[in-house]
Every structure is written in structure tokens, then in C-alpha cells.
Amino acid sequence: MLSEMLAHADPSQVAGLSRFFKTGPGQYGEGDQFLGIKVPVTREVVKCCWRELDFADLEECIASEYHEVRLAALLALVEIFAHVDKRPRVKPGVTGKKPDDTSFRTRSGISRESCVDFYLAHTQYINNWDLVDLSCYPLLGVWLLDKDRSLLYELARNGKTLWEQRIGIVSTMTFIRHGQLADTFAIADILLHHPHDLIHKAVGWLLREAGKRDKAALEAWLEEIPGQARNDDGVMPGRDRASQMPRTMLRYAIEKFPEAERQRYLNR
């Protein structure tokens, strides 16, 4: 896969991608290197290559100095994770045929759990928002659907990097898509006063997605004062979450609200 990615390098795109992903001095992507490959091209390379890869191949790619090669490694890992436990299939109603060759056969040493272990062992290379957002919830989120989710709380609270903390909240997208909103709200509380704009945007985005599922639940969360009970009159003393949130986080969270409601929150 590495050679395929290198073959698609486009130097004319490097400057634009470097600006877009903020690689200048003091910016969040400082020092990252690009080949000039757009995401659709990277996806096409991964689509052609992922069935042939093992962890040694992924190790080589995820440690690359090039952003797009690291993304390719993560997208390939997601594909392997999604298919590794699937058995070859025979098309319904067809007998005497070989299993469908497009099915991914389980390989020795590769399992869903080992994919997750590989991902968590290499988070130092998941060092920009697109690398997080395109990999964490189709892998960690899916893995944790029927498991204890304290890992995500630990990442959000004590992640060694901004990107590990972002993994903590963005992974909950899978739970939201299954109608499970509690973890998104709880992890948003952990990150409510985070100093970085990229966390504000991520938390606001996930809150907005939760609100699409249950607007009343999002409104209740915004109106509540964390850690304080209602008094006998039903009035909550102090400041509600909406009044405490960074403005970018709030804007993202209420983006789909009717305009009058949005202005009511923004004018607090």
C-alpha cells in the first residue's frame, strides 16, 4: 500500500493541504508532511489494497511522516476490523459454487480485538482531526457497543494528547446512531471547559448529532446545571451548561435549532 500511495503523490496539492491542516509554526498540525493526495484517492488505494495487508504493513504505514499514508493505514485498519470475523459466503440459492471471493477470510493473528489493540497502541500517530474522525467511531465505537465504555471516559479526561481526548468524544457517534445518547452527554461534561477550539467543535458536533435523535434530551442537558439539584420551585440556581459552554461548542450544538431558539441560547 505504501508504494501505491507514493505513486499517487501530487506536489501541486501539497501547499493547499498543509494550510488546510494547519501545519505552520505553533499550529495544531505543526510539522506534518503531505504528499498532496486527496481523501477520495486515498480511499481508492485502500479499497484495492486492504485485503492483502497485515499488521506489519500497517505498522510501516501508520508510522509514516506523510499524513495521507497514516490516514490510509487507519482506513485499512477499519476495513480489516469490519470484515475480519466474516466467513466466506455462498450466494443464496446457489449450490456447488465457491464462496464469494470478495469476502474477507479470517487470518491467523488478526481479530477485532487485535485491531483495537493496534489502534490504541498507535494513537501517537493519530495526530490530526481527520485521522481521528475517520477512524475512531467505526472502530472503537463499534467495538464498545456491547462493552464497558470507561476507556472513552479515560481518554477524554486523561488523554496524553488533544487527539486522544477527541477520540474519547467522537467515538460516541456510533452509540448515537444506535439511539444511545448518555455517553455523549457524560463525556461532553468532562470536556465542557476544555481550552482547545478543536475539542469545542468536536463536542458541539456530537451534541448536535445527539439532538437530532432527541432534541428534548439535548435541551434538558443544555439547561441543567452540572452537579446541582433543582430546588423545590424547579429553578436551578447558578449557571446552566449553555451559559458556561465555549461559544463555538454551543453554536455547533444548537445549529439545527429554529432560529428563535438559537438566538435565545446565544444571547444568554
Image (spheres, rainbow, N blue to C red):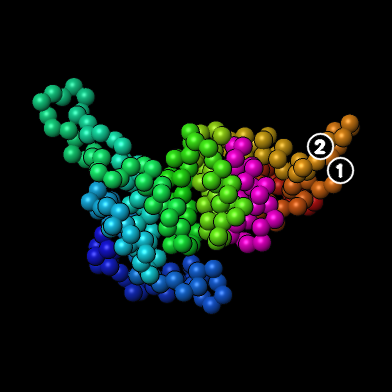
Label 2, secondary structure: give it.
loop
Label 1, secondary structure: give it.
loop
Q: Is residue 57 left or right of residue 116?
A: left
Q: Residue furthest right?
A: 233
Q: Residues within 10 Å of mark 2 (few under 14, many from 20)?
A: few
Give the percent coordinates (x, y) of residue 104: 25, 41
In the rendering, which numbered label is found on residue 229? 2
Q: Amino acid at mark 1?
A: Pro
Instruction: Specify whether residue 189 is painted magenta.
Output: yes
Give the percent coordinates (x, y) of residue 265: 75, 48
Q: Looking at the picture, does residue 74 appear above or below residue 66?
A: above
Q: What residue would you read off at disc 1?
A: 237
Q: Amino acid at mark 2?
A: Ala
Q: Residue at x 60, y 55 (%)?
A: 158
For the residue pair 223 and 161, the one nearer the viewer reads as 161
Count of picture labels: 2
Q: Residue at x 72, y 43 (%)?
A: 222
Q: Residue at x 28, y 45 (%)?
A: 109
Q: CA distance from mark 1 to mark 2?
A: 9 Å
Q: Looking at the picture, does residue 182 appear above or below residue 169?
A: above
Residues at discs 1 and 2 in contact (Cβ within 8 Å): no
Q: Is residue 104 left or right of residue 205?
A: left
Of marks 1 and 2, the one in the foreground: 2
- Looking at the rendering, the stretch of residues picked out in magenta corresponds to 181-210
